[in-house]
Image: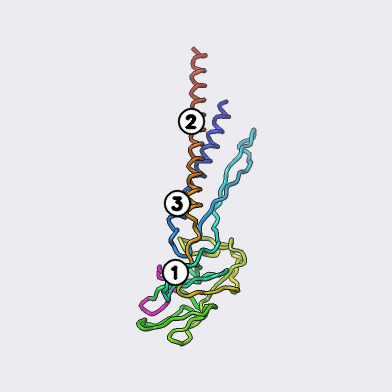
Amino acid sequence: MYIQNRLGLIESTETMLAQTQRLNQITNNLANVDTPGYKKEDITFWEMLYTNNQDRQRVGKALKILTNHQEGSVKDTGNQLDFAISGNGFFKLQTPDGIRYSRAGNFLLNDEGQLINPDGYLVLGDGGPIVINSNIDGNEVSVATDGSLTVDGENAGRFDIAAFENLADLEKQGTNLFRVKNEGAEEQPAENITVRQGFLETSNVSVISEMTGMIDLERAYEMQQKVIRSFTEIDSKAISTVGKLAS
């Protein structure tokens, strides 16, 4: 009986820890519901049978965080430095840690007239960092659907947009950046994409779906708490009964 209760407590505790991790992901998704280009995170759970000692096996729980790369909807902003990609493609950014990728196209200009993201990272074009102009007053920027830029009618390069055959080769870094996690993964030319100026891709988080998941988690968590209380009561009764027999 003691061993069974102990294993039951371990199972319930592991389940609650996994549910806590999932709750953290839901909270993070909801916090970024208004973040341009944000890709929500999901968690998958599975169980495995492993040898606990020489005498018995037990079931262990595992989880894995997955990024949902489904495209978000497109919002009209009217800002000439906002851009949205439709299709499999990522803007390339130069960061202190190397090249990073993002779906968020809410860009700005730095003091040198270079296109940057809100964190100050340079947006890359086919010839290096994209330069609009050192004097931004009066400049008219336009972008073709293939990502080619013109400033006041003059060619200003083209967005260097990267694509990946398997999006699982990417992992999140921070909120809106991705990096390549598998050494064998390589960039591919982005095909069948459309770049839209004056638009932003919104987060792909569904508030209703996340709130529903949060309610389900709360119920499941409460159920595991009841299970733990039941095992505690069984142990208490067992101890009390043993004490009476000994006396």
Q: Earlier in the sequence, mark 2 or mark 3?
A: 3
Q: Are marks 2 and 1 in contact (CB under 8 Å)?
A: no
Taking the magenta stretch, the answer to whether it contains residue 134 is no
Q: Give me the C-alpha separation between circle 2 and circle 1.
A: 51 Å
Q: 195 or 23, which lies in front? A: 195
Q: From the image, state whether disc 2 or disc 1 is nearer to you.
A: 2
Amino acid under label 3? Answer: Thr
User: Considering only vertical position in the picture, is 90 above or below 62?
Assistant: below
User: Considering only vertical position in the picture, is 225 above or below 92?
Assistant: above
Identified at 43% across, 61% down, the residue is 34
User: Considering only vertical position in the picture, is 87 above or below 32?
Assistant: below
Q: Earlier in the sequence, mark 2 or mark 1?
A: 1
Task: Give the quarter of the figure containing the N terminus.
Answer: top right
Disc 3 is placed on an element classified as helix
Give the residue pinned by disc 2.
Answer: 229
Total numbered badges shown on the rendered structure: 3
Disc 1 is placed on an element classified as loop
The colour scheme is: rainbow
Q: Give me the C-alpha separation between circle 2 and circle 3.
A: 27 Å
Give the residue pinned by disc 3.
Answer: 27
- Badge 1, how many Cα within 10 Å: few under 14, some, many 20+? few
Give the residue pinned by disc 1.
Answer: 96
Q: Which residues are magenta?
A: 110-122
Q: Position of residue 54 (x, y in %)?
A: 64, 35
